[in-house]
Amino acid sequence: MTTIEIAPTISPLTVPSSLDDEDASDFRAYADLNRQICDESVGLPDLAPDAAQLLAGWQDGTDTVHTGFVVRRGDEIVGMITIDYAQEEDAHAAEVDLMVPERYWGQGVEDALLALAETEARAHGRSLVQIWSLHRPIEKERMLAPRTGWGRIPAIPLSDLLEARGYELEQVERNSEFDLRADPAPLRAARLAAESAAGEDYRVLQWMAPTPAELRPGYAAILARLSTDAPSGDMDFVAEVWDADRVERRERRLTGAGQALSIVAVQHIPTGDIVAYNELLIGADRTGVTHQFGTLVSSAHRGRRLGALVKTVNLLHWREVMPRSSTVSTFNAEENRPMLSINEALGFVPVSYSGAWQKRL
């Protein structure tokens, strides 16, 4: 009997107006595949947002343009890739997410998609491609060290592919989890110690999104610093441009599908500047995993325990307003020892790692 091999086809990912639309099936499949890849890679499907959470960002290309492609064999989806383009004038990177299930890996799908991403990046005037890999916290015979020199990750098929295509492992990030149901006494003690260390020149602000209009300019200023002040090795990130309108757009995207976002910030009283912040986000399912988004202390105000202050205040507040969520998940660069030290002292434990890769075209 002769077996006819069905050649794969690649088509753009359709962005529907609504997940109930007839053309929304591929977008829903994209969200499902994203969770599947996180599950297969590290056993943590909740690292990925659901389709409703993703859709708002894809529909608004003001700050980042999202594109994607779907690979099929016949009617079956065998892989996808997304390519994101920051819209700052001097942005020259394309950020890529490659999603090929284990059962289809090694059949050429991943190679074709990554080659397509590089071609698309060039066509969009981008000179480099950035991509992230997920890794279990295990030791293997072949361990990879980033150019920062901090952290190691076990080799996996995706990292083998990236090395073969000339990508450099620039940085390793640690994914840690915190048990929200643990005894809160250590959190309370850490908060008191941080308040004492901060002194009288700083005060804590806390709000649930949307950010009040009077706080948006100051919040925008500290959000902008995340792209320049957070440790990123030699990853070539553009300095993001933020204003009050961008804060409003971002929060519409983050909360548009029923999510809740809590922000704790520290204001420097003599200047009125917001100099530290921490964010916690949960989806419409309030029993799900909470994701810690940004955490930053302005470089001029470090050494005063402000990072510990914003984290402990937000975690204690979150226990009250989201009592059904059991876990907080966060990512930190391995070289960001001050922030990791805070996390470890509070009880965060490593559960996975990610590798940040980059290739100049």
Image (cartoon, rainbow, N blue to C red):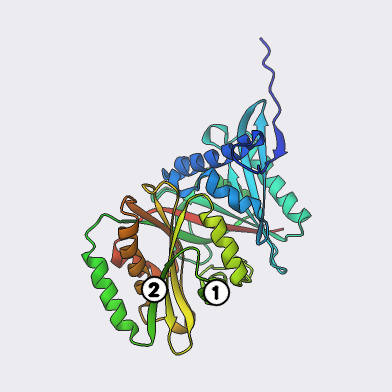
Mark 1 vs mark 2: which is more N-terminal? 1
Q: How far apart are marks 1 and 2 (CA)?
A: 15 Å
Q: Do the residues labelled 1 and 2 touch (CB within 8 Å)?
A: no
Residue nearest the viewer, comparing 309 with 207: 207
Q: Is mark 1 on a helix, strand or loop?
A: helix
> Is there any visible trace of residue 105 in the rendered image?
yes
Query: Crowding near pointer 1: few (<14 within 10 Å), some, many (20+)?
Result: some
Q: Which image quadrant is residue 344 in?
A: bottom left
- For the N terminus, the quadrant is top right
Relative to 211, does residue 111 appear above or below in the rendering? above
Identify the residue position indicated by label 2 in the image. Answer: 307
Locate residue 134, reporting x and y percent: 49, 50
Question: Which residue in the rendered view is the most extreme toward the bottom?
Answer: 270
Residue 224, above or below 120: below
Residue 27 position in % (x across, y down) = 61, 40
Residue lying at 26% horizontally and 76% vertically, measured from the top left: 192
Horizontal arrangement in the rendering, residue 181 relative to residue 203 (left or right):
left
**At x 46% / y 49%, what residue is drawn?**
47
Residue at screen point 52% across, 49% down: 257
| Total numbered labels | 2
> Residue tagged by mark 1?
225
Residue 181 placement (x, y as % from top left): 26, 54
Look at label 1 and name its amino acid. Arg
Using a 10 Å C-alpha cutoff, classify the residue at mark 2 as few (fewer than 14 neighbours), some (14 to 19) or many (20 or more).
many
When the figure is inspected, residue 323 is found, relative to residue 18, above or below; the finding is below
